[in-house]
Amino acid sequence: MIVIMKAKAEEEDVNRVIDTIESLGLRTQLNLGAERVVVAVIGDISKIGEENFFRIRAMKGVENTVFVSKPYKLVSKDFKKEQTIIDVDGVKIGGKKIVVFAGPCSVENREQIMEVAEKIKKAGASMIRGGAFKPRTSPKDFQGLGEEGLKLLYEAKEETGLPIVTEIMDARDVGLLSQYADVLQVGTRNMQNYTLLKELGKCDKPVLLKRGMWATMAEFLGAAEYIMNGGNENVILCERGIRTFSDYSRNTLDLSIIPAIKDESHLPIVSDPSHGTGRRSLVLPMSKASVACGADGLLIETHPDPDRAISDADQTISLSSFSKLMEDIKQIAKAVGREL
Ligand code: PEP
Ligand code: MN
């Protein structure tokens, strides 16, 4: 349930509403919008009952009370109309500028990550991405360098100033990863790992939440709600392709979810054409299409020697292709009123 306050409601009106809700054993979360305050009710809504629902609606300063039947509330535009802009060390995600998170699938060694950091910075990327803990289909495959990989990313950050995005796979690693990373990525396979999502809800790092490769939009937004429900409002959504019958690509990049989410949620959403297609030749056209349909950013896998990338070589583009991609995207961004 959400309680929408009148534009001219006073602070004491809002406080009275909060006290009433909390006296019923429920929690509240506030959105202090530019025009009005919206109070979200969190917890077992059945505790409210019909009588209290109408009692709250009649309170001074209240415009309306709405029962939300969707599996999400805090992520929805009903709760917050204004677009959320997340500031990571001065990089603003969700604003006019398209943000590009670039780097290899896995951090492999110092030379690799340093070369990537330097070249993507020159090409105009906003953040460096690279996996230190890797979710692999086979346990025999390279699992990432672990903390050593995080240290190398940190060196690359010190050298270039690019903030770090890296994947977290285990709720027990929030403390460790937070020492190095600026944004914690939840991979497609963990989108419904609720233990992990709840832990991330309690931490102070922005989260890049990738869509489960099977997930509906409601499930995707429901996963984001878990993080926001814990108090962490900095969630960046990421479309990374879903499983379909398509036989020419690894996944099907579901671009129409980008404008669909823009209608439904205030959270920024970025696109990952690398995992979304699994094919080098499709990364550039789908990056263009992503920006054209409203994505707030891109996640691109790039490597100094793509053919030798330890993971995801098929979809990894060279550093020179990456620079060219950045140039091409600039034109598209301009055409849709954004900038790069
Ligand atoms: C990645 O970004 O390297 C990755 C493993 O992504 P996904 O979880 O989307 O497969
Ligand atoms: Mn990858």
Image (spheres, rainbow, N blue to C red):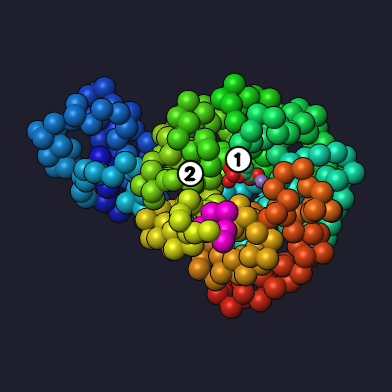
Of 78 and 307, which appears nearest the observer? 307
Pointer 1 local density, CA inside 10 Å: few below 14, some 14–19, many at least 20: many
Secondary structure of the residue carrying tag 2 is loop
- Apparent side of residue 127 relative to residue 84 in the rendered image (left or right): right
Residue in view at x 62 percent, y 70 percent: 285
Residue 164 found in image quarter:
top right
Of 288 and 66, which appears nearest the observer? 288
Amino acid type of the residue that numbered disc 1 sits on in the rendered structure: Gln
State the quadrant of the C terminus: bottom right
Q: Which residues are magenta?
A: 248-252
The answer to whether residue 162 of the structure is visible from this angle is: no
- Apparent side of residue 335 relative to residue 146 in the rendered image (left or right): left
Residue holding disc 1? 185
Position in image of residue 303 (x %, y %): 79, 52
Residue in view at x 27 percent, y 47 percent: 4
Residue holding disc 2? 212
Q: CA distance from mark 1 to mark 2?
A: 13 Å
